[in-house]
Amino acid sequence: MDSNQLSPLRKTIVGVQFLFVAFGATVLVPLLVGLDPSTALMTAGIGTFIFHFVTKGKVPVFLGSSFAFIAPIIAASKQWGMPGTLAGLAGVSLVYFVMSALIKWQGKKLLDRLFPPVVIGPVIILIGLSLSGSAVNMAKENWILAFVSLVTAILVLALGRGLLKLVPVVCGIIVGYIVSIFMNAVDFSEVLSAPWFALPPSIAHFQMPQFAWEPFLYMIPVAIAPVIEHIGDVYVVGAVARKDFVADPGLHRTMCGDGLACLASAFFGGPPVTTYSEVTGAMSITKVTSPQVIRIAATTAIVFSVIGKLAALLRSIPAAVLGGIMLLLFGTIASVGVQNLIQHKVNLDKTRNIIIISVTLTMGIGGAVLSCGSFAISGIGLSALVGVILNLVLPNDKEEETESVNE
C-alpha cells in the first residue's frame, strides 16, 4: 500500500503497531545477555534509520536485536567482560561489509557456494539448542511462573489470529508478569525510583568499547547465520511488497546497511541487529509495506528507549518468566534449522551431507574449543567455520552433481 494513501494518524498507528510486533524480541535479547533493554530499543531505532539511509529509503525493513548472538555474548562476557564483548561485536559488521563487497563483485552465486543449506541448517539448529540448558536453569527458579508463561505463549501461537498470532512472546511475558505480581515475585523498588525520562545507561555514561583481538575474532564466524538470514529476508520482503529489492537498491546495499547498523549498535552498547521477519509478517497481514511507516516504528522505538520507568519495568521481569518463554523460543529456532534442511531438500542419504551436519552439530553441542595462546574460538562460531570448511573441501560425487543440474 502506498503511504500516500494513509492519513498521518493511520501511518502512526500502523507504525507503532509494527514496533509492538518487534518489541518483545528486541528487549528479550538484552534481558537474557545482561545488556540494557532501553539501549537495545534505541539502537534498533538508530540501526533501522541507518539501514534506510543506505538503501535510499526503499526497503521496508525493521532491524531488531539478533537472537543468533545470545549464546556468544553470554560466553564472551564471561571471558572478556561486557566492554570487550561489545568491541568483539564490531567484528560482526566486518562480515557484512565483506559479504556486501563480494555480492557487488561476484553476485549471490559465491555466497551459495560458501553457505549452502547443508551448512546453514545445522548452524541455525545450534543457535537454538546451545542455550537450552540456560532456559531450563532460569525456568526452574519458579516452575509455576515458567509454566504459565510457556503455556500462554503456546496458546497464542497455536490459536491466535491476525496480529495477535505475531506476539506470543509479548503475551507470554505479560501474563507471566501479572501472575508474578500476585505471587509477590516482583520487586518494584527500582521501578518506583526510576525517572520517567532518562537516556539509556550505556549512552548516558558512554564508554568506548575496549578493543581486543580475541573477542573480535570470536564473533566473526557467528555472523554467518544472520548474514544468510538477511539474504532470505530481503527476498521475502520483496515478495510481500511486490518489488525486486535485490535489483534495486541492490543486495549489496541492504547488506552494507545491516552491517553499519550492527557497528552502531555495538558502539552504543547494544546487541547486534538483524532484519525482523516478525515485522514482515505484520506487513503481509496489514498490506502496508511503506518504508515511511517502518521509520515511524523506528522513531517510536527511540522514544520508548528514553522512558526510564519502562526500562526499569522490563528489568523487573522475573527470570523464571523469561525462562518459560526461552523453552519455546530456542526450540522454535532449532526447528527453523530443521525446516531449512527440509525446504531445500538436503539429501541425507549422501555421506558428504551427513558428515557436514554431524560434525557441525556434535562440535557445537559438545562445546569444542580451538585455542591458540590467549585466543580461543568455540561454540557456534567454531562449528559454523568447520561447516564452511568441510563444505569446501569434501568432494561432491557425480550422482549428486547430476541431481543438482537436473533440479
Image (cartoon, helix red, strand yellow):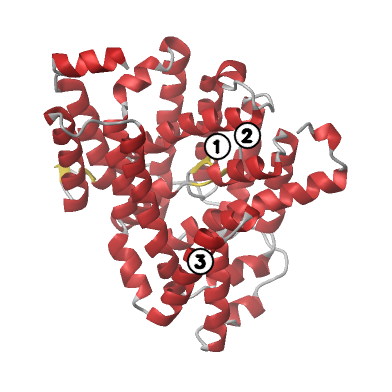
Q: Where is residue 272 in the image (x, y as percent from the top left)?
A: 48, 44
Residue 36 in sight:
no
Q: Residue 155 carries which label?
A: 3
Q: Which amino acid does label 3 sit on?
A: Leu
Residues under numbered marks 1 and 3 in contact, where contact means CB atoms less than 8 Å apart: no
Which residue is tagged 2? 50
Q: Write down the quadrant of residue 329 in the picture.
A: bottom left
In terms of sequence position, does the residue under pointer 2 or pointer 1 come before the other?
Answer: 2
Q: Which amino acid does label 2 sit on?
A: Ile
Q: Distance between the residues labelled 2 and 1?
A: 6 Å
In terms of sequence position, does the residue under pointer 1 or pointer 3 come before the other?
Answer: 3
Residue 177 in sight:
yes
Q: Distance between the residues labelled 1 and 3?
A: 34 Å
Question: In which quadrant will I find the N terminus?
Answer: top right
Residues under numbered marks 2 and 1 in contact, where contact means CB atoms less than 8 Å apart: yes
Residues under numbered marks 3 and 2 in contact, where contact means CB atoms less than 8 Å apart: no
Q: Which mark is residue 325?
A: none
Q: Which mark is residue 261?
A: 1
Q: What residue type is labelled 1?
A: Ala
